[in-house]
Amino acid sequence: MADTNVGRVAGKVAFITGAARGQGREHAIRLAEEGADIIAVDVCDDIEGLGYPMATDDDLADTARFVEKSGRRIVTAKADVRDVDSLRAALERGVAELGAVDIVVANAGISGTPAPAAMIEQSAWQTMLDINLTGVWHTVKAALPHMTNGGGSIILVSSMLGLRGGGYMAHYASAKHAVVGLMHSLANELAPQWIRVNSIHPGNIRTPMLDNEQFIRTLRPDLADPTLDDAAQIIGSFHMLPQPLIEPRAVSNAILFLASDEAQYITGAALPIDAGAVAKF
Ligand code: NAP
C-alpha cells in the first residue's frame, strides 16, 4: 500500500525526552500531526527534593494515545535522563520498531526549588545539573549512533533563563546557560554530517512546572488561595509582550520549524520563544 504520510516532518522519527506531560507531550503531538513517528521517554517518577508533583505512567500512556489519534506510531519507555543506559535501551527498542532517528528533542527538565544562590542545598544544585545539563548531554549521546539517515535536527530545550539571569534560580539558570555551550559545540561538531543543533528558550509556559502549589504560593504569599493566573500577574512582567503565560503549542510550533527542512540552514542558533523576555530592558 502506498505511504500516504504527508506533513512538514513526514516519514521522520523523533526522539523526545520528558514527553509524559507539559511541553514534551505537546511536542510529540505536534510532530505526529505533521507526519513523524515518536519515541517518547519520561522518568514518570518523583524526583528527590522537588516540591511539586511529577508525571505518572498514566500521563505517558495518555501521550501515546494522543499521538496515535493523529495516525502516527509511538514507542514509549520509562527512562531517567540521568541514566544513559536507560535512554540507550529505550532508543534501541524505538529504532527497532520505527527506524533511525531524524529529530531529537532534549526536553526533560526540572525547575527546582527557588532559593537565594548561596542558600541552595548542595544536593539540589547537583540534581539540577544532573538532569538539566548532563541529562541533555546523555540524550544526544544516546541518540547520535541512531541518527544514520544522513542528517537530522537536534533541539536542546533551554529557557529564557539560559540567556539571562533570574533571582532565586541560580542552579536552574546555570544549567540552562550551559546547555547553550553544549549546543554551540555540538553544532560545530555535527555540521559536516548535516546534523543541525539549535537551542530553544521558552518564557513562562503554562505547564505543570509552573501550575503547581509550590510555585504559585511562592509568588503569591499575599493570597489565601492563589491560582496560576494570580501568579502570572507577577511573572508576566518578565515578558515584553502583554501575555503573561504562553501555551505549550507555541513552543511546539518552533520545535516543528527547527525539526523540518524549512530550517535546513539554521544551526548553532538560540531561539527565544519568550514574548520578548530575554531582550526586555
Ligand atoms: P513539566 O510539565 O514538569 O515536564 C517536564 C517533564 O520532564 C516531566 O514529564 C518530567 O517527568 C520529565 N523529567 C523530569 N526529570 C526527568 C528525568 N530525570 N528523566 C526523564 N524525564 C524527566 O515541565 P515543562 O514546562 O513541560 O518543561 C519542559 C522543559 O521546558 C524543561 O526542560 C523546562 O526546564 C523547560 N522550560 C519550561 C518553562 C516553563 O515555564 N514551563 C520555561 C522555560 C523552560 P516527571 O514529572 O515524571 O519527573
Image: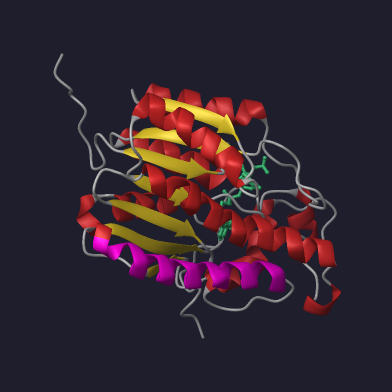
Is residue 176 depicted above or below 47 in this figure?
below
Horizontal and vertical percent for residue 33?
Answer: 33, 34
Decide if residue 11 is on the left or right side of residue 93: left
Quadrant assignment for the N terminus: top left
- Asked whether residue 73 is in view, the answer is no
Decide if residue 281 is on the left or right side of residue 268: right
Residue under the image location 46 percent in, 58 percent down: 156
- Residue 191 counted in the magenta span: yes
Horizontal and vertical percent for residue 91?
Answer: 47, 36
* Viewer-side residue, 229 vs 250: 250
- Asked whether residue 216 is in view, the answer is yes
In terms of secondary structure, what is the magenta stretch mainly? helix
Q: Quadrant of residue 126?
A: bottom right
Residue lying furthest left: 2
Residue under the image location 61 percent in, 30 percent down: 59
Q: Which residues are magenta?
A: 170-192
- Residue 28 counted in the magenta span: no
Q: How many marks?
A: 0
Q: How is the image coloured?
A: secondary structure
* Viewer-side residue, 220 vs 38: 38
Horizontal and vertical percent for residue 237?
Answer: 59, 72
Q: Quadrant of residue 36?
A: top left
Residue under the image location 48 percent in, 68 percent down: 182
